[in-house]
Structures are given as C-alpha cells and as structure tokens.
Image: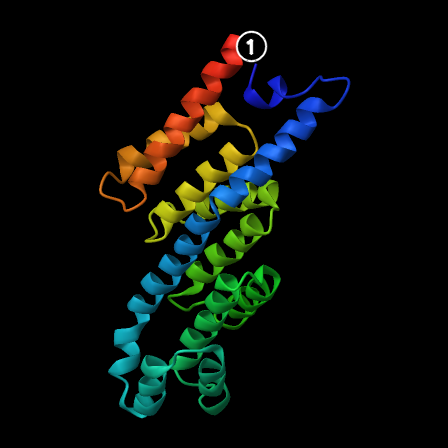
Amino acid sequence: MNDKNQNQGSPDGKNNIAVADGRENLLQKYGTILYAAGAVILIVALAVVFYAIKINRDNDQASRLLGAAQNSKQFEDIIGKYPKSPAAPAALMAIASSRYASGDYDGASALYADFILKYPRHSMFTAAELGRVMCLEARGDVDKALLEFNSFLLTHPDNYLTPQALFGKARCLQITGKLTDAKIVYEDFIAAYPESKWRQQAESALHMIDRQLRAKQQGN
C-alpha cells in the first residue's frame, strides 16, 4: 500500500486535516528554500546569456543598463527603450524574479508565461518554464506543480536546471505525503548531484522522512 492510500479512510476526516496542516507547515518550512531556488534560476539563466549580450556592439547601451539595473522600474525601462535588444528578455526575467521574491506568485507566473510566448527559442526559455512551475508550488498548488516538475524532467533530462527540477519534485512529493516516493527522489538527487549546494537540504529532508515513516509503522 502506498503512502497516499495510507492517508485515506478516516471516517471523521482527521487524517485529511492532518495532511492539510502538514502541507501548510512544509510550505512554510520550505519558503526560504523556494526563494533561494528561484534566485538560483535567475542567476544561472542570466549567466548563460550575459556574455552574448555584452559582445553585441549594437546593444552596448542596453547591456550597460542591464548590468546596472537594481529594481523593476529600471528593468522595465530597458524593455521600453530597447524592446528588440538581447537585454529585453533578460530584463523581463529579472522582473519576473523580482515579483517572485516579493511573494507575487501570480504576477511572476504571468511574466514567465509572457516570456515563454515571446521567446520560444531563447536560451532562458527553460528557466521561464521552471520559474512558472515554482510559482505553482509556492502558492500552494502542489499537486499541479508535481505534474509540471515531472513534465519538465521528461522534456529536459540533461538541462542545467534539471537538478532544481528534481529537487522541486522531491519537495512536492514530501508535501503531499508521498513519503516513500519522496525519499527515492531525494536519494536519486544526492547520488546524481553529490556536490550540489542543495545536498544538505536533501539529507535533512531524508532524516525527516525516515522519522515520519517510522512513526507511521509504529502506529500501525
């Protein structure tokens, strides 16, 4: 019997309440991790395109403005003044990341979707895809986020953002109470990316899952 089935069957609904409370607590616990993961997506994605922007002499001014920009208004100005420059999509991603960091997940998701529509061949396309999925997770739509993380991993098995997607999948499995499945994914993550900055969080999550599984076994 899987973990999901074990959480069903309570006539008074207490198990469902416990699962809901568990989701809320885990979402709060991983709030900082989600914020950091979103920042990593932007930093890595910007690094991929920044060199290409810099070497384009026709866009030197847009490139300089992009490097100096520190807030959404400045990024919006770049898009307004240089909409056709390579700096424009990077500025759009920066605004989306800023919305995400401020907790405006709906706004960030809309901007990521706009990027996906406008720049389907851009090198930051996958970063926008993953950013949109992380918005789903951050606003509590964990079941849908899990499906989207799975889809991302199937479509991009060797992408530079695959580790973040795999870790996101593990988080969603844990939050939804699929503890055995979550444990497997965390173990796969550690085995595949032993030097990852997220390894410590993965190991901590594994310890928590082991305690939860032992507690369930003792209660049966």
- Residue 45, picture quadrant: bottom left
Q: Residue at x 62, y 19 (%)?
A: 5
Q: Quadrant of the N terminus?
A: top right
Between 78 and 213, which is closer to the camera in this rendering?
213
Residue on which disc 1 sits: 219
How many marks on residues?
A: 1
- In the image, 127 versus 138, the foreground residue is 138
Q: Is residue 204 left or right of residue 1?
A: left
Q: Is residue 194 above or below residue 39?
A: above
Q: What's the residue type where badge 1 is placed?
A: Gly
- Closer to us: 133 or 32: 32
Query: Looking at the picture, how far across and down is residue 28, in whole percent?
Result: 52, 44
Task: Give coordinates of residue 99: x percent, y percent.
Answer: 52, 67
Q: Residues within 10 Å of mark 1 (few under 14, many from 20)?
A: few
Q: Is residue 120 visible?
A: no
Q: Can residue 83 be spotted in the picture?
A: yes
Residue 119 appears left or right of 65: right
Which residue is at 44% across, 86% downward?
Answer: 78
* Displayed quadrant of residue 52: bottom left
Does dot 1 land on a helix, a strand or a loop? helix
Image location of residue 165, percent across then percent down: 42, 46
Residue 20 at x, y percent in the picture: 64, 34
Q: Quadrant of the C terminus?
A: top right
Residue at 52% x, 52% y is: 133
The residue that appears at 60% across and 24% down in the rendered structure is: 4
Dividing the picture into quadrants, the one containing residue 57 is bottom left
